Amino acid sequence: MQQNNDTTNGPAAAAFLAAGIGSLALALFVILAEAMTSVKNALNFYNPVGPLSGKTTMAIVIWILSWIILHSAWKNKQVSFAGVFTASLILIILGLLGTFPPFFDLFGG
Amino acid sequence: MVFTDKELWTVIHGMLLGAIFFLAFSGIWVTLFSLHPERTAGVEKRVSRLKIATWATALILWLTVITGTYIVYPLYRAKPPEGANLTQFPRSYLLASPERAGWHNFGMEWKEHVGWLVPILVTAIAYVISRYGVTLVKEEKIRKAIILVFTIAFIAALAAVVFGAFLNKAAPIK
């Protein structure tokens, strides 16, 4: 694991923002599966687990891809950490909200 | 005192892996707060322990959600054959009664989703701690961000663990 004594804040910003994107992605898949039977069926990657298998797998794929892209873009850059972290927090909170049953049940058919 | 295979997996998933996370959380949290510019003595040792602890915690969390989703959850949601004793099929047992259905519709539905946010957040934290190491002492914004995200992860984990315990009481996997 690389450790710099005089490093930029880009890698930290990328890690937090990607975690926020992954959190939001999970919430979106939960809501979409609740709202549309076709999505729910498409996310049923493994029958004993049901759509939860697809929701979580897709969220993780999006999280990792976004982390790779953001890290590549910001690995040597100094970014507005406060701004990026605020955006990350908003995405994480939306992720928590979207996985809360009284909220995602609002989208149920 | 004999566990069935099914009961053993619920113990591994909830009591063993879940409990380790809670123990690790308190140690990591205290160490994060100890990383302060005015407390530089022994900082390298503390950061070194912190790296190991956060990566180990992230690994435990991934194992927790994977065993929970791919081993315990299929046991919970198994469909009963006609005329079966529903107490052997927790999801169906809970949904068969309006008084019990909330345990599934709220408790399990929340637990099964929110639990997956926790390893994502803690893996990001483990990476940031490894990447920045002792420089976290002077990187106040990043250090505070780590503490805040780790606290959110803890609250999400708490929701999952508490409902896991309640569900195992309301409709145990046997």
Image: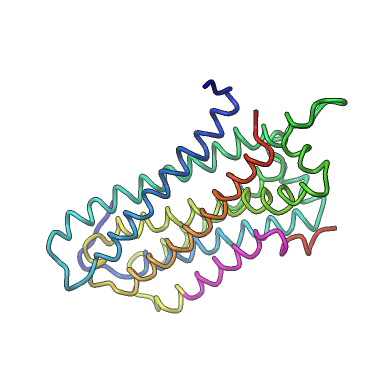
Depicted A32 relative to depicted B52: above or below: below
Instruction: Please say whether residue B58 is one of the residues in the magenta stretch.
Output: no
Please state, as top left, top right, bottom left or bottom right, where the C terminus of chain B lies in the image: top right
State the residue in front, B93 or B64. B93
The picture quadrant where one finds residue A92 is bottom right
* Residue B45 % position (x, y): 17, 54
Please, what is the dominant secondary structure of the magenta stretch? helix
Depicted B145 relative to depicted B112: above or below: below
Q: Residue at x 22, y 52 (%)?
A: B48
Instruction: Please say whether residue A100 is one of the residues in the magenta stretch.
Output: yes
Depicted B155 relative to depicted A8: above or below: above
Q: Residue at x 63, y 65 (%)?
A: A97
Q: Is residue B153 left or right of residue B30?
A: right
* Residue A75 % position (x, y): 36, 64
Residue range (magenta): A86-103
State the residue in front, B104 or A47. B104
